[in-house]
Image (spheres, rainbow, N blue to C red):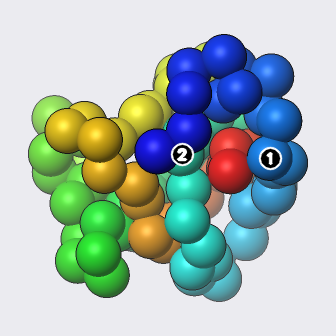
């Protein structure tokens, strides 16, 4: 688990997702760049989006930052629509 300040400045890099192809990487944070509907947000290969989005079928608004809880890391993201920046 990276320290908060290294995540804030994206010290380990970023990756922009703007299509419906699943990305499997170790992800410290997800920054929503435009209104986005998630197909999945995975932890340990298991979809956990319902633990992070109260109504998963509704778009998450631009500017939202999603961080895993309990010192975990996201293992994958797949979008239905929109775009996000993955922070490593």
At x 66% / y 16%, what residue is drawn? 5
Q: For this rendering, which residue is in front, 79 or 46?
A: 46
Residue sitting at 44 percent across and 33 percent down? Answer: 66
For label 1, the crowd category at 10 Å Cα-Cα, with few meaning under 14, some 14 to 19 and many 20 or more, is few
Q: Position of residue 77 (x, y in %)?
A: 50, 66
Q: Count up the numbered dots.
A: 2
Is label 1 in contact with label 2 (beta carbons under 8 Å)? Answer: yes
In the image, is 66 to the left or to the right of 25? left
Task: Quickly name the residue at label 2.
Answer: 28
Distance between the alpha carbons at the discs numbered 1 and 2? 10 Å
The secondary element bearing badge 2 is classed as loop
Viewer-nearest residue: 88 or 46: 88
Q: Find numbered disc 1 in the image and state the secondary structure of the residue it sits on.
A: loop
Left/right of residue 8 with respect to residue 44 in the rendered view: right
Question: Is 60 rendered above or below residue 18?
Answer: above
Determine whether, in the image, residue 40 is placed left or right of residue 55: right
Instruction: Please report the residue visible at 46 percent of the width from the left and 45 percent of the height from the top.
Output: 1
> Mark 1 or 2 closer to N-term?
1
Which residue lies under the disc numbered 1?
Answer: 12
């Amino acid at each position: 688990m990276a320290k908060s300040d290294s995540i804030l400045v994206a010290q380990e890099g970023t990756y922009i997702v703007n299509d419906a192809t699943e990305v499997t990487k170790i992800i410290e944070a997800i920054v929503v760049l435009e209104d986005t509907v998630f197909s999945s947000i995975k932890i340990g290969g298991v979809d956990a989006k319902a633990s992070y989005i109260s109504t998963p079928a509704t778009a998450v608004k631009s500017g939202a930052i999603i961080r895993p809880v309990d010192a975990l890391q996201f293992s994958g993201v797949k979008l239905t629509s929109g775009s996000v920046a993955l922070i490593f």
